[in-house]
Amino acid sequence: MKKNTMKLLIILIFSLLLSSCETKVSKISFDQCQAPCWRNIVPGETSQKEAEALVHEFTDIKGRDMVFGGENGIFNGITSFTLRNGISIEIYYLNGIVAKIIFYKSSGISSFEKCVTEFGTPEFIGQSFRYGPGLPIGATSAIHPWVFAILANKGIVFGYDAYQYFSDEVVLSPRKQIILITYYDVNLFRLLLEYGEIVITDGAERLSEDDLYEWNGYGNIEELYPQK
């Protein structure tokens, strides 16, 4: 009896240790403020000057390398850097105020399911098609389908590249690895959507809410969210 009790206690302790080690959307989430705020930088509120001053205080920037750029598309400025955990950050400014913050890591930031748990159920799904690497044989290219989950009223988008080398089937599952997360100023939703800054496009395409799909759960993308 005592041996069984001891085994159960060990299993319980081990389970607690594992759960405490799990990352939240983790690699970018902090207790300082709630998304779309990040490390006290709030899209739509924080000025470029304030954001740059905050970034200078970060102690986990890889190599302490920061780039401060000028005009970029519809934006008036950009601050970019990479954290030691491998996530690349880009902060975009419009009229001297933070308009959006992009988090990117090609190997994945978190799973789709964990993003839903932390941010909430998406309101919309958006799709785009962009050129990218093709078969891993020679210098080939291919059209990559991208899937974006949008919480329009919260100012949060998370997405992934759904391209597969040997299959055209695109399936949305809870386990899909999210490689791109965007926090944005909700007041700029229509502008950012139109210019391909929410559902990321190659630049020329102009989008509206009519191009989005209401959230319809997990499954085959072509069946649940047929191309318009």
Image (cartoon, rainbow, N blue to C red):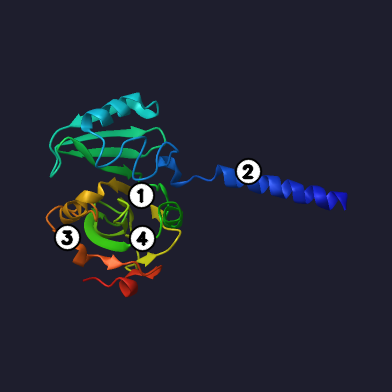
Near mark 3 (Cα within 10 A), the count class, few <14, some 14-19 or many ≥20, is: many
**Can you say whether 178 is above or below 228 in the image?**
above
Q: Position of residue 171 (x, y in %)?
A: 38, 66
Task: For mark 2, give the secondary structure.
Answer: helix
Q: Quadrant of residue 40?
A: top left
Near mark 1 (Cα within 10 A), the count class, few <14, some 14-19 or many ≥20, is: many
Near mark 2 (Cα within 10 A), the count class, few <14, some 14-19 or many ≥20, is: few
The numbered mark at residue 179 is 1
Q: Position of residue 180 (x, y in %)?
A: 33, 49
From mark 4 to mark 2, how far is it between C-alphas? 30 Å
Is label 2 or label 1 in front?
Answer: 2
> To which residue does mark 4 refer?
122
> To which residue does mark 2 refer?
17
- Say which residue appears at 81% left-offset and 50% top-offset: 5
Q: Position of residue 134 (x, y in %)?
A: 27, 56
Is label 3 or label 1 in front?
Answer: 3
**Can you say whether 192 is above or below 86 in the image?**
below
**Can you say whether 6 is above or below 143 in the image?**
above
Is label 4 or label 3 in front?
Answer: 4
Task: For mark 4, give the secondary structure.
Answer: loop
From mark 3 to mark 1, how far is it between C-alphas? 22 Å
N-term mark: 2 or 1: 2
Is label 4 or label 2 in front?
Answer: 4
> To which residue does mark 3 refer?
207
Depth check, front residue: 58 or 97: 97
Depth check, front residue: 203 or 116: 116
From mark 4 to mark 1, how far is it between C-alphas? 16 Å
Q: Are marks 3 and 1 in contact (CB under 8 Å)?
A: no
N-term mark: 3 or 1: 1
